[in-house]
Image (cartoon, rainbow, N blue to C red):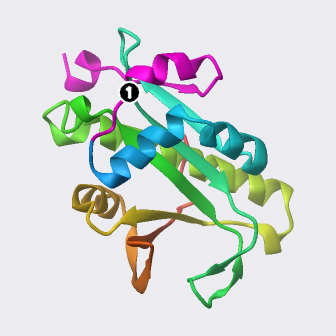
Amino acid sequence: MSEIEKYPLFADEFALADQLALADLHCGEEPWARAATEWIRGTEVLDAIERFQTSVWIFRDVEDFIIGFGALEATSWKKWPPPDGKKSRLLYLRHLGIGAKYRGFPPEREYRYSNRILEHLIAQAKKMAITIRDSKPPSKHVELLTLMVHRDNLPAQKLYQRYGFELLDGFERDDHFAMSHRLDLDSDSN
């Protein structure tokens, strides 16, 4: 039995009822981990869903324990690269949070929950980009997945870099770096 079969991970779209189950999720004590925990357990997640049509997934194991969450949205027109780039539409990975007790688990890197959650979010970003490409004029197409990562969150930076995200040189806002990943929309998006 492979690690992925031993440690299945299920993605469900966020529902209001999930907030009760999220009371036990703690992403850690670092400032970025506390911010992620507060975001998903508070009213900000509901505001993001309502105001920005943010898509949020809750990731659970086979015993229905919450492992983590991820949030993705299409932005309105933003300057990219910041601060003075041309106005562009972007996909934005708003949050990726992992319960502190699940960090580095399972031990084999290719099966780790953090990797599988990020792979899910990249696949969802591709689907969003393809839907936009198929339904909007070319001026509204998106092919860049962006995120902000705390400058001291080196494990997250390494994770994102393994998946092709690049740091935006010379840009920092509120102790966060910008990173981007060009989506390959010509490959299979499943």
Q: For residue 34, what is the image quadrant?
A: top left
- Neighbourhood count class around disc 1 (C-alpha, 10 Å): few under 14, some 14–19, many 20 upward: many
Q: Position of residue 17 (x, y in %)?
A: 62, 16
- Residue 152 lies in quadrant: bottom left
At label 1, which amino acid type do we have? Leu
Residue 118 seen: no
Residue shown at 20%/32% (left/top)?
Answer: 105
The correct choice, above or below, for 1 with respect to 145 in the image is above
- Identify the magenta region: 1-28
On-image quarter of the C terminus: top right
- Tag count: 1
Q: Residue at x 38, y 27 (%)?
A: 25
Q: Is residue 12 left or right of residue 32?
A: right
User: 47 or 164: which is nearer to us?
Assistant: 47
Residue 11 part of the magenta segment: yes
Q: Out of 143 and 69, give the one closest to the viewer.
A: 69
Q: Is residue 179 visible?
A: yes
- What residue is disc 1 on? 25
Point out the image quarter for the N terminus: top left
* Residue 102 as seen in the image, left or right of residue 31: left
Residue that appears at 46% across and 23% down: 22
1 or 76: nearer the viewer: 76
At x 22%, y 29%, the residue is 101
Classify 183 as above or below 118: below
Residue 99 left/right relative to 19: left
| The stretch drawn in magenta includes residue 172 | no
Instruction: Tell me the element at label 1.
Output: loop
Residue 167: image location, x then y, percent:
38, 75
Q: Give coordinates of residue 127: x percent, y percent.
A: 64, 47
Looking at the image, which residue sits at the far left?
A: 107
